[in-house]
Image (cartoon, rainbow, N blue to C red):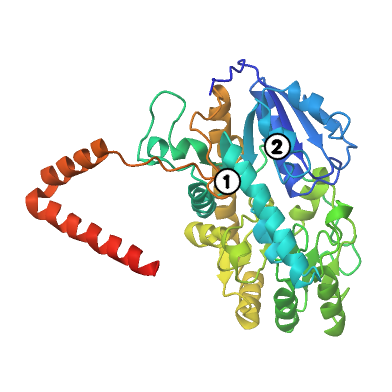
């Protein structure tokens, strides 16, 4: 494989499956912030959305990614960064010579496991198979894999190993042959979601005394992102119903009920949450839903008027390997965090003391945490200070360091690509010289006794193999 030469000012194409508009969801926010960071390093950046575009870039280009321009956009780039699945619909991408970066901070196949989609078993099996095939194709081809935390890194290294991409040339500690093979640490790098570098300068007067049901002196919990099937807002609503008897001024505000990407709308949990709040008699009084997605540039005003940021989830694979992206906005706003145990962000809260973690699904523990946050002002102030401290360590410029370092000298992976699932390479036959080398190695390591033991093992295995054919 020849090395792809990339100029110091690379042409970078970021392909994203979300709308680029004033109302940015998580993947679009990430693409936007990556574009900002790369542009600041003088790269020529284009964001290409396969959905829709209604927002201009900030020193970078923003275009639609369509069938009539997709190949031209890829061909005019040096580096392509993917989010989501594109190989299935555009298999020609895999054979293009551009350096390809797979941004797998969001394990989308595990998110599917948390969906209440109403599919029958055959349809579920088909979708999981398609998602797994897409991931295998991307990981087989990737020149760089980005992930959000150590757990995800282990997940992707495991899948790379199954595909045959963890090899002697890159799998040993410190492997670096100087020929582009690098090490597995070079191939899989941690670059999580970040905290915006922009100062927190909110325009207030958007929530308290403005949104129906929320007064100027209320104690406000804010749910900062979307309500998806892999979250558990129902336990939170039940906990609010319990806690409101001790904290009558308690209010829970969901910043977004409807996803800005209509293609992703259809989650069951948002309607379940509204129904539960109505059933408990607290809809519009203690639990308030914002019907529209808050524009990205206006979110600071809502966060500034909240007292605590909350996120709750069930146990499961999605939770274990997730990285709750909107929690970064809580840090930016200096908000204490109340969250369920089990994910990486809960670990961060426990390590840095910027809030409270509670057992999954425990209504009483969650209600007690809410009451404590409302009534213990010194503790709340200490948690808020810890959030602000943590925010400084998790800015986009810092967390994207591994990607920015790669972009200083990007190159194609020189490890030959094997797909152990679909096209495993043939195993070379052992020669008489191999047998001699093995005998000499065993003799050096353990002397005649080790040689005799290995010979006996081989005889036993051969006997088992022959008996299994009878």
Q: Which quadrant, please, contains the C terminus?
A: bottom left
Report the residue marked by disc 2.
Answer: 33
What is the spatial separation of the Cα atoms under label 2 and label 1, in whole angstroms? 16 Å
Tell me the tag on residue 203: none
Indicate whether 194 appears above or below 250: above
Indicate whether 246 appears above or below 316: below
Mark 2 secondary-structure assignment = helix
Judge from the rendering whether residue 150 lies leftward or rightward of residue 306; answer left or right: left
Q: Position of residue 128 (x, y in %)?
A: 69, 60
Closer to the eye: label 2 or 1: 1
Report the residue marked by disc 1.
Answer: 147
Q: Where is residue 73 in the image (x, y as percent from the top left)?
A: 79, 26
**In-front residue for pair 107/279:** 107
Mark 1 secondary-structure assignment = strand
Indicate whether 409 appears above or below 464: above
> Are there few (<14), some (14-19), or many (20+) residues within 10 Å of tag 2?
many
Camera sees residue 58: no
**In-front residue for pair 2/355:** 2
Indicate whether 346 appears above or below 282: above
Camera sees residue 90: yes
The residue shown at (47%, 26%) is 180
> Are there few (<14), some (14-19), or many (20+) residues within 10 Å of tag 1?
many
Choose the circle earlier in sequence order: 2 or 1.
Answer: 2
Looking at the image, which residue sits at the far left?
448
Judge from the rendering whether residue 212 lies leftward or rightward of residue 85; answer left or right: right
Q: Position of residue 100 (x, y in %)?
A: 63, 32
Q: Where is residue 109 in the image (x, y as percent from the top left)?
A: 67, 57
């Amino acid at each position: 494989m020849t090395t792809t030469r990339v100029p110091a000012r690379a042409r970078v194409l970021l392909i994203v499956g979300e709308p680029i508009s004033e109302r940015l969801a998580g993947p679009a926010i990430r693409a936007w912030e990556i574009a900002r960071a790369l542009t600041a390093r003088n790269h020529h950046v284009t964001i290409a959305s396969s959905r829709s575009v209604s927002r201009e870039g900030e020193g970078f280009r923003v275009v639609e990614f369509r069938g009539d321009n997709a190949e031209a956009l890829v061909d005019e780039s040096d580096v392509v960064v993917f989010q989501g699945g594109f190989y299935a619909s555009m298999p020609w991408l895999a054979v293009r010579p551009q350096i390809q970066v797979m941004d797998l901070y969001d394990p989308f196949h595990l998110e599917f496991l948390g969906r209440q989609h109403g599919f029958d078993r055959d349809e579920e099996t088909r979708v999981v198979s398609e998602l797994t095939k897409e991931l295998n194709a991307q990981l087989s081809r990737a020149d760089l894999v980005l992930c959000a935390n150590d757990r995800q890194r282990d997940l992707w290294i495991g899948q790379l190993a199954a595909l045959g991409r963890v090899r002697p040339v890159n799998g040993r500690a410190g492997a670096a042959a100087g020929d582009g093979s690098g090490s597995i640490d070079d191939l899989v790098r941690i670059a999580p979601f970040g905290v915006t570098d922009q100062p927190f300068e909110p325009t207030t007067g958007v929530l308290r005394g403005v949104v129906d049901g929320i007064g100027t002196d209320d104690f406000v919990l804010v749910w900062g992102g979307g309500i998806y099937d892999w979250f558990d807002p129902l336990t939170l609503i039940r906990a609010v119903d319990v806690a409101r008897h001790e904290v009558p001024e308690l209010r829970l505000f969901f910043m977004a009920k409807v996803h800005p990407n209509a293609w992703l709308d259809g989650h069951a949990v948002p309607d379940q949450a509204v129904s539960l709040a109505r059933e408990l008699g607290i809809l519009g009084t203690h639990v308030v839903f914002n019907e529209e997605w808050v524009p990205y540039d206006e979110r600071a005003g809502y966060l500034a008027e909240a007292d605590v940021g909350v996120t709750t989830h069930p146990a499961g694979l999605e939770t274990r390997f997730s990285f709750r992206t909107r929690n970064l906005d809580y840090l930016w706003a200096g908000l204490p965090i109340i969250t369920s145990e089990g994910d990486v962000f809960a670990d961060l809260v426990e390590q840095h003391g910027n809030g409270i973690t509670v057992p999954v699904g425990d209504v009483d523990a969650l209600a007690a945490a809410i009451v404590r946050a409302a009534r213990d002002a010194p503790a709340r102030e200490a948690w808020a200070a810890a959030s602000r401290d943590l925010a400084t360590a998790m800015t986009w410029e810092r967390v994207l360091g591994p990607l920015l370092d790669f972009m200083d000298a990007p190159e194609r992976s020189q490890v030959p690509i094997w797909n152990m699932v679909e096209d495993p390479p043939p195993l070379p036959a052992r020669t008489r010289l191999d047998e001699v080398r093995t005998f000499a190695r065993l003799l050096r390591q353990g002397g005649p006794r080790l040689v005799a033991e290995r010979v006996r093992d081989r005889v036993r295995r051969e006997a088992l193999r022959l008996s299994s054919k009878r």
